[in-house]
Structures are given as structure tokens and as C-alpha cells.
Image (spheres, rainbow, N blue to C red):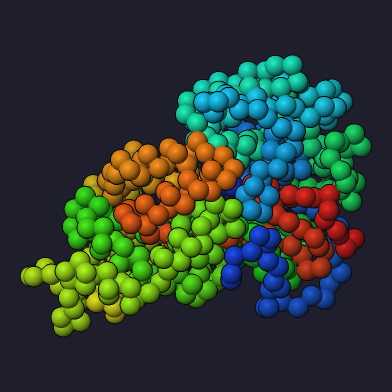
Amino acid sequence: MKKRKKNLRLLAAVLLLSTVLSACGEEEPAPTSTPTQTPVPTATATAQPKEFALPCYPEAGFHPIQGTNRTNLALGGLVYDGLYELDQTFTPQPALATGYTVSEDRLTWTFTLRGGVTFSDGTPMMAADVAASLTQAKTSALYGNRLAGIASVQAGEGAVTVRLTSPNGNLPALLDIPVIRETGGVPLGTGSYVLQQSGESYILQRRNDSWRTPAPALETIPLRTVEEANDLLYAFDTQEISLVGTDSTGVGALGFSGSFETMDYPTTNMLYIGFNTAQGPCRDAAVRQALGRGMDRDSICSALLSRHAVAATLPAHPVSSIYDAETAGTLNYSLQEMDSILTQAGWSRSDGVYQKGREKLELTLLVNQDNSYKTGVADAIGRDLTAAGVSVTVKKLSWEDFTAALSAGEFDLYLGEVKLSADFDPSPLLGGGALNYGKYNDPTATGLLSAFRAAQGEERTAAAKALYERLGEQAPFAVLCFKNWSMLSQWGQVSNATPTQQNLFYGFGNWSFAN
């Protein structure tokens, strides 16, 4: 597709496509275990859906481990498989692995590989392919952070052995890494489709020898070539492509229009308020606890994030099995509890502001000004806390000034976003973590974190509860919500879709299509 519609160029030049994958670290309705589908009310479906087609950026390359183009990476869910895949509750489901054994110290995991799996050229998948793929992923920008705890990967007879530097009882949740075989061009995959090129045209061709059942309904999926963001907008608006994924509340979210349906799905992208635990009023854990009780998370999700988020008070998504509702309830919004905590800590309200002696409870909240949704959330928190007796000044900064102020500790509160790994390890926000700008250090929490990371099964649930209770007492940060991302599809063209954060095409064999 060539460049078109000059009037769209100015709009799209400042926009970035956000699909199933998100960068880690700062950017950045009732919970349900499955995505929720809602029609877009501004459009009326009248046109007959066209052929199901997807976008691609050929010039960006199609490597599923080293690639950086999010649209192309999304296609990987149809072409490649990992040892495991994550369902809508972030639970790892077996894919190329059928099971595992773990050593007593929980540092050595041996994964049994599924037999009879072949790459798209018909050659058998070998343990060496899995080991090489994981080893390559360890050094990639896309997967390197989550695999930092892997010391080595070794191929065996029908199995792969992974050795860790420290125990992780939920390692399978990190192993939805594409297994590939390098060819010098587009790597081979074991998935339901193979990417084929004819001249400047690309298609996904369904494989007849795939291990997956049921087979997808579509034999071929045309790929429409796009070169830049305005091409993508135009192609979707004119129904030349059928489906896109987007972070609707992200920086530069694209302004899609026309007749389409929206299906939200949960992510591990967590919005939170970070506290300066080293200096200022927030060095007192009681103040931090109280502030956390003064944040109306439900209102933030519904009114400010357009319901593209799920309220939470713990650093795990509410659909996750380790989310402890009882502990979460003790951290919910309650101005009465906020007042009680501050009163017990020696603060009293005078002339509308809490004071302790001559000290007034006056705080500065930092936020990155580049995202209008986040500045709206920060403004709302500032207004609500100020109305409740805590004087909050919201300071909106450019990304460079924002990160510089955090590194220098020049804040009381800040609004942050982090993409947690699928095992919901909160290490980045705690002692030694890259996002621990508030200088929180608690040996008890560190020990509980280690126990949580090492635990499996019911032990992990109990360990998570103990960790969350400690974090509730210490309140180094206050969780606000987990963002939903959205799959946009042409009206009436797709049904039974079950997108997930890591695979927009999860369960594709069960999808139905109008044409």
C-alpha cells in the first residue's frame, strides 16, 4: 500500500502504534477472566465485511526475537510457538513443552518437549532449537529483562534444562518465547501459519502439518503492506485490514475511525503512585498508608481511563490466582480510614489541611506531561487528596525532566507505569529495583519477596499473601490499576476471539469469521 491521504499524514506523524507488546519500565468494570467485547457507539455497521486481512511492515523485518516493530511481532502469534503460552488469567498453558521436573533447590528445571512437532519446512523441532532460541532471547531487547535470572540453557534428548541464578517457582510464565530455527531470512516457526512472499506481496499460509488443533478456519490470510502510521489508519478505516491492537490510553494512541468493534483484554501494565520513603512527609509509613486509602481507583478507571483499566490495590492483576481479595480489601478507597490513620499518626486537620505541630501535610506529585491520560489521573488524585485535607501540588514535566527529578529524589509522590512480568514479580519497585526511586529498603519485605519468587502452587499463593500484607503495612507504593489494551476489528467480521497481552491471536483455531 503506497502513501495516501495527505490530510492524514500530519495527524499520524506524531502517533505510534501500540499492539500486544509494551516496553518495560516507566512510560507508562469488574475484573473478569475473559476479554469483554463492546461495540463502538459512534459507528453504525452497514457495509459487508471484506476479506480478513492483517497489516505488516516488510521493511521492519519479521524476526520474532530481535524485531522491534510491534505490528510484525503481533503476527508472530500465528507463526511461532513457545514452550508455554499465557491464557487470559496469565496462567501458563503447555505448548511446545508437555511438562517439567524441578530440582529440590528449585534452580534447575527440565522441560519435556512435545513429540512430532515440525517447523514449517517439515523438519523436526529439536531440543537444540529450543535452547538456541532461549539463549538468543536472553540477549534481546524484547526478552532480556524477563530472562535475566537464567544462568544457562542446555539441550538434552527430547528435553531442555534451564538453570537459574535464584529460584523462580513460576518460571513457565516467562517461557512463551518464540522457538525458531534461523535460516538467514525470516526464521522458521512451528505455528499454524507460515509467512510466504511473492514479489512485494505477503500472505500467511495455513500449515496442514501443524501440531495444533483445531486448525484455524482461514487457509490464507493476506497481509497488507504499510509503510507508516497514516497508511495503517487509512487501511483500517477503509476496511482493507480487519484487525489491529492498540493501547488506547498510551502515548500517541492512533485515532481509528469508522465501523469497528472493541475487545479489551488484560495486561500486566500497572499504574501506581510511588512514594519518597527517604525524605519528606512520606518517609512515614502511616502517611503512605493513608494516602493510598485516599485514591478512588474505580473512578480513575471509569471516568479517566475510559474503562480501559481494572482497579487494583496489589501488584498483581485481579484475574491472577495470586491476587488476594481479602488483603486487597484492606487497601481500598476510604476517606474515613485515611483520616483514622493520619489521626493515629499524630496529624490533625486545621483550616482544611492536616498538620502535625507546625508542619503541614503538603506534597508534590510528579507526572510525565507527554500522556494526557496520566496527567488527568494525576490532576484527579491531587484534587481529591487536597479536598480531603492533604495539600497536593501536581507538577507536570517532560520525560527527561521527569526521570531526572525521580533519580534525584526531588518528589514526594510520582505517577508511574511499569510492565510487570507475567509472574507478577514486583522486584523493580523494591530494594535494588530499577524503579525504586523512593529508596525503599525493608529486609523483611526482601525476605518475603524471595520466598514468593521461589514458591510453587498453593505455597506461592500463601507466599504472595504474606508479601502483600507486608507491602500493605509499609506502602512503598500504591497500586492504582492494571491497564487493558484493545483489539479493534471490523464490525461483525470476527467472533470467539480471545486476545491476550502476549498473543493477539491466542486460541486462533477457535475463532470464527464472517467471510
Q: Nearer the viewer, residue 167 or 439?
A: 167
* Quadrant the C terminus occupies: bottom right
Q: Nearer the viewer, residue 69 or 151?
A: 151
Picture quadrant of residue 12: bottom right
The residue positioned 70% from the left and 43% from the top of the image is 93
User: Is 283 positioned to the left or the right of 128 in the image?
Assistant: left
Q: List the single residue furthest toward the left.
A: 358
Number of numbered discs: 0
The residue positioned 66% from the left and 60% from the top of the image is 33
The answer to whether residue 404 shows anywhere in this view is: no
The residue positioned 65% from the left and 27% from the top of the image is 101
The answer to whether residue 480 shows anywhere in this view is: yes
The residue positioned 69% from the left and 60% from the top of the image is 34
Q: List the single residue furthest toward the bottom.
A: 351
Q: Is residue 185 above or below residue 77?
A: above
Q: Is residue 377 above or below residue 63?
A: below
User: Is 258 positioned to the left or the right of 471 in the image?
Assistant: right
Q: Is residue 281 above or below residue 107?
A: below
Q: Residue 237: horizontal and vertical position, in percent? A: 71, 65
Q: Nearer the viewer, residue 396 or 22?
A: 22
User: Is 450 positioned to the left or the right of 158 in the image?
Assistant: left
Q: Residue 503: horizontal and vertical position, in percent? A: 68, 47
User: Is 354 positioned to the left or the right of 246 in the image?
Assistant: left
Q: Residue 63: horizontal and vertical position, in percent? A: 67, 33
Q: Residue 170: horizontal and vertical position, in percent? A: 57, 39
